[in-house]
Image: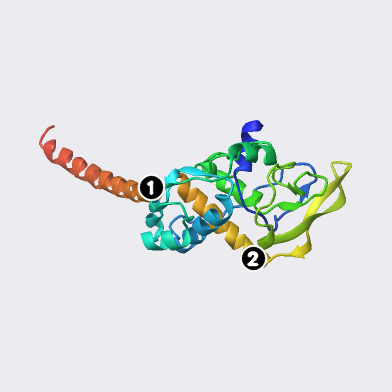
Amino acid sequence: MKTIQKFVLGVCLSLAAVTGVQASGDAIAWDKAPVKTNDLASLQNGAKLFVNYCLNCHSAAFMRYNRLQDIGLTNQQIKDNLLFATDKVGDTMKSNVDPKQAKDWFGAVPPDLTLIARSRSGHGGTGADYLYTYLRTYYRDEAKPTGWNNLAFPNVGMPNPLWELQGERQPVYEEREVHGHATQVFTGWKTVKPGTLTPLQYDQAVGDLVNYLQWMSEPVQNTRVRVGVWVLLFLAVFTFIAWRLNAAYWKDVK
């Protein structure tokens, strides 16, 4: 459980609306993340969100800024829009937060996010699905030290870093009979304070961030898939040639 908490603390963003009906206190179903790691515009926006909101507390120590050229950014664009004052294009993405202070604030040192999208699967979904759901299910809870809680990860230690974009919400429950027992069932959200983005815009922003996190966990995945397709085509053609050669060699053998 501690490992899961450390991973989840590493995810920095917020939420909008989880669809479906779910019993209070139970793990909610994960929404499908709109992952398209070949969508350069989405990846670029996700990288911007990551740098502006995640790197304040978390690092991506296995990713260098200049690797963002792979998603269509030039070195100059990286320098102008994504680097902090003391960083260089060839540097790794490291946070400047003091680990000791971060542990005092959140109860644990914020983990590295390079592989966060590959860290968890379950509920019939992927790590990206979990992150997409988690980042969209924060809500105000004044009973918690940070003032925030999360439906996907109850009692989460990390506050909602994108609350200004998303706004503040409260979950809405209805009492229903489930298997003969009265149960509080989650049915939707009530807006307490609107954010600077509409719910749809916020969902799209979270989708872009998760898309970037998925890409960052394996930047060569698109190349790997393309190479794999060509390898399979080559093997198919070679198999056909080998089959015909075999038939030619043995045609006179009775």
- What is the secondary structure assignment of the residue under circle 2? helix
Three-letter amino acid code of the residue under disc 2: Leu
Q: Is residue 103 visible?
A: yes
- Dot 1 or dot 2: first in sequence order is 2
1 left or right of 227? Answer: right
Indicate the quadrant containing the N terminus: top left, top right, bottom left or bottom right: top right
- Foreground of the two, 39 or 103: 103
Q: Is residue 122 visible?
A: no
Q: Nearer the viewer, residue 247 or 193?
A: 193
Q: Secondary structure at mark 1?
A: loop
Kindly identify which residue carries mark 1: 220
93, 166: nearer the viewer: 93
Which percent across, then down, holds residue 174? Answer: 86, 53
Within 10 Å of disc 1 (Cα), the crowding (few <14, some 14-19, many 20+) is few
Q: CA distance from mark 1 to mark 2?
A: 30 Å
Which mark identifies residue 247?
none
Question: Residue at horizontal 37%, vertical 59%?
Answer: 75
Q: Which residue is mark 2?
A: 200
Above or below: residue 199 compared with residue 58: below
Q: Within 10 angstroms of label 2, few (less than 14), some, or many (20 or more) residues?
A: few
In this picture, residue 47 sits left or right of residue 204: left
Amino acid type indicated by mark 1: Val
Residue at 55% from the left image edge and 50% from the top image edge:
55
Q: Residue at x 54, y 54 (%)?
A: 50
Q: Residue furthest front?
A: 86
Identify whether 103 is placed above or below 202. above
